[in-house]
Image (cartoon, helix red, strand yellow):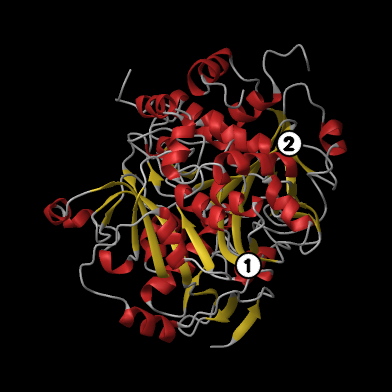
């Protein structure tokens, strides 16, 4: 295949699919009880300089309790898949990220991420490699397929391509230019789901985002779950399993684990809670104060929920259409 | 301007909504496109098939979506899938329209939402492509919604996040983008713009109510060609404004 052009971005994580196979071969295939706390899961499975990914999306089904614990424990030199609202924003606020394969980090209707700007200006975030949203998702899909790349027709002709690590080749079948994105194999993935059994067989309600692809692209996968369910519930409807147990290393029970984001059918997003971060993150001092109050202050997720308050959490549940008042 | 019965945001929303056609598929992004799609569904396009990038397909927009992955993007929807499914549908040619925004746009409709200044040492780091590049690459026609001034309408964008017609006629196809795709309209607070069928450069189609040709050109950092004649876009109707205020954004997220 003739290479027509190449993005200039560095390959932050090489698509070593053979090493991935060897890794997966060694993963336990037995049904093992993987329940543990946020603290134990982060201690055991996230290391300095890891390449980390999160799913879904900051204000929606996001692994916020895991992210807060990761900041509490601290890790150096993380590289991240940059598709995020609040979760990577908090990591940036704690200056823990040095490189990112980037598609979107922002605050949606509240605009640009101020911590992103500050981390870029300060030189802490040293490398930003650009991708489109689907480009990044297809990188997970390639890893999920166990192949080193996938062809795609996004990003072509743009600076998004020029500042990526993608390539354009002459298609060996049609002779036309086609883009290639390399597989992205994460060292560790954090995914929050509605429910799973103690082995990690997981169900998601509503849209699946990129959970199917990303869960299959992780060396280590930490699941946080709103509810732990019996394996018989899984076995009764196996078609509902989007993440099978053998992909999973830890199952963390975390009710309201996506707070202040939403969890469809369970609780709504906490708009004042999100706005509090939007306002606080405008300055370095505000960011520090927010982290002190909501991340370093509470010793664990249970203490965080106490801080938010049962009444407030019950309100967020009652706001779900068809529930409460 | 201050005496008008509507504000510039409401004008943008109503103008964009009118470009949405019943029984078509449309990619909807954060902000004004969400409001425009909700308004269109309640006015002339009840079967507007909305698609959100994280998988929501065919939602009824009773509650205004505020996040592209939020539950409102698949409220009473026909499918709740994932990002690969919906962008791959666009890649297969299923999605007719896509709505886009950005910090800068050039005469060929290329959009920047990544950086102002140099990529590695930016003046301002922006949120990035997200799904914008995919929408601009894969949908048959794209419609950009912009505030109109010389900082935003520039001869050359600092960074091409999302492809318009790139460098001109034939450039999209030469780059490998799907043939027959590209920018269709730009909706601004001053004008509705299109693209010349041969040069692929931006073209003034209509002015917004009370805005002159000269005002549009003055706010544009490059020479605009004009349709003959340039028409005037009708004002938002009382009915559009009532539905927008009382039903679409009744929680006042945007207006």
Q: Secondary structure at mark 1?
A: loop
**Percent x, y of residue B125:** 74, 53
**Percent x, y of residue A189:** 44, 63
Label 1: chain letter: A
Mark 2: few, some, or many residues within 10 Å (few <14, many ≥20)?
many
Q: Which residue is mark 1?
A: A77
Q: Quadrant of the C terminus of chain B?
A: top right
Q: Is residue B83 visible?
A: no
Q: Residue at x 60, y 74 (%)?
A: A12
Q: Is residue B97 visible?
A: yes
Q: Which residue is mark 2?
A: B147
Q: Residue at x 59, y 58 (%)?
A: A103
Q: CA distance from mark 2 to mark 1?
A: 39 Å
Left or right of B24? Residue A33 is left
In this view, A64 is above or below B242? below
Discs 2, 1 touching: Cβ within 8 Å: no
Q: Given this view, does label 2 or label 1 mark the residue nearer the observer? A: 1
Q: Quadrant of the N terminus of chain B?
A: top right
Q: Residue at x 54, y 32 (%)?
A: A273
């Amino acid at each position: 295949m003739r290479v027509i052009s190449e993005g200039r971005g560095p390959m932050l994580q090489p698509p070593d699919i053979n090493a991935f196979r060897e890794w997966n071969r060694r993963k336990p295939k037995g049904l093992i009880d993987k329940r543990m706390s946020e603290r134990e899961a982060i201690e055991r499975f996230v290391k300095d300089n890891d390449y980390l990914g999160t799913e879904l999306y900051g204000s929606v089904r996001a692994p916020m309790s895991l992210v807060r614990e990761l900041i509490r424990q601290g890790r150096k030199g993380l590289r991240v898949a940059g598709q995020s609202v609040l979760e990577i924003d908090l990591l940036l606020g704690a200056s823990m990220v040095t490189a990112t394969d980037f598609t979107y980090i922002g605050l949606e209707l509240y605009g640009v991420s101020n911590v992103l700007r500050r981390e870029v200006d300060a030189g802490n975030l040293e490398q930003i490699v650009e991708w489109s949203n689907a480009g990044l998702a297809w990188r997970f899909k390639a890893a999920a397929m166990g192949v080193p790349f996938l062809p795609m027709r996004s990003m072509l002709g743009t600076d998004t391509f020029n500042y990526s690590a993608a390539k354009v080749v002459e298609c060996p079948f049609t002779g036309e230019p086609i883009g290639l994105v390399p597989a992205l194999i994460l060292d560790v993935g954090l995914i929050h789901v509605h429910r799973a059994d103690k082995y990690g067989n997981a169900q998601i309600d509503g849209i699946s985002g990129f959970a199917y692809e990303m869960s299959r692209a992780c060396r280590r996968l930490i699941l946080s779950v709103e509810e732990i369910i019996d394996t018989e519930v899984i076995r009764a409807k196996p078609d509902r399993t989007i993440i099978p147990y053998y992909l999973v290393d830890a199952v963390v029970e975390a009710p309201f684990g996506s707070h202040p984001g939403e969890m469809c059918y369970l609780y709504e997003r906490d708009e004042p809670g999100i706005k509090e971060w939007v306002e606080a993150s405008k300055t370095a001092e505000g960011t520090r104060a927010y982290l002190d109050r909501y991340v370093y202050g509470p010793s664990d997720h249970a203490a965080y929920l106490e801080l938010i308050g049962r009444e407030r959490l019950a309100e967020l549940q009652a706001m779900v259409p068809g529930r409460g008042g | 301007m201050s005496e008008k019965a509507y504000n510039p945001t409401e004008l943008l929303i109503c103008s964009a909504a009118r470009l949405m056609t019943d029984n078509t598929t449309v990619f909807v992004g954060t902000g004004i496109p969400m409001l425009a799609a909700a308004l269109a569904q309640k006015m002339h396009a009840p079967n507007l098939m909305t698609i959100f990038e994280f998988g929501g397909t065919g939602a009824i927009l009773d509650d205004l979506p505020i996040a592209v992955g939020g539950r409102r993007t698949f409220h009473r929807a026909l499918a709740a899938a994932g990002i690969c499914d919906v962008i791959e549908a666009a890649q297969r040619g299923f999605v007719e329209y896509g709505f886009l925004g950005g910090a800068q746009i050039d005469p060929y409709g290329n959009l920047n939402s990544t950086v102002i200044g140099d990529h590695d040492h930016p003046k301002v780091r922006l949120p990035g492509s997200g799904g914008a590049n995919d929408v601009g690459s894969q949908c048959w026609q794209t419609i950009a919604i912009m505030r109109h001034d010389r900082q935003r309408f520039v001869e050359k964008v600092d960074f091409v996040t999302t492809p318009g017609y790139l460098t001109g006629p034939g450039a999209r196809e030469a780059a490998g983008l799907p043939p027959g795709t590209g920018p269709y309209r730009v909706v601004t607070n001053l004008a509705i713009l299109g693209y010349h069928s041969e040069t692929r450069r931006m073209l003034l189609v209509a002015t917004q109510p009370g805005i002159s040709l000269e005002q549009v050109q003055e706010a544009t950092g490059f020479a605009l060609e004009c349709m003959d004649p340039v028409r005037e876009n009708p004002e938002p109707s009382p009915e559009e404004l009532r539905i927008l205020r009382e039903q679409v954004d009744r929680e006042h997220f945007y207006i």
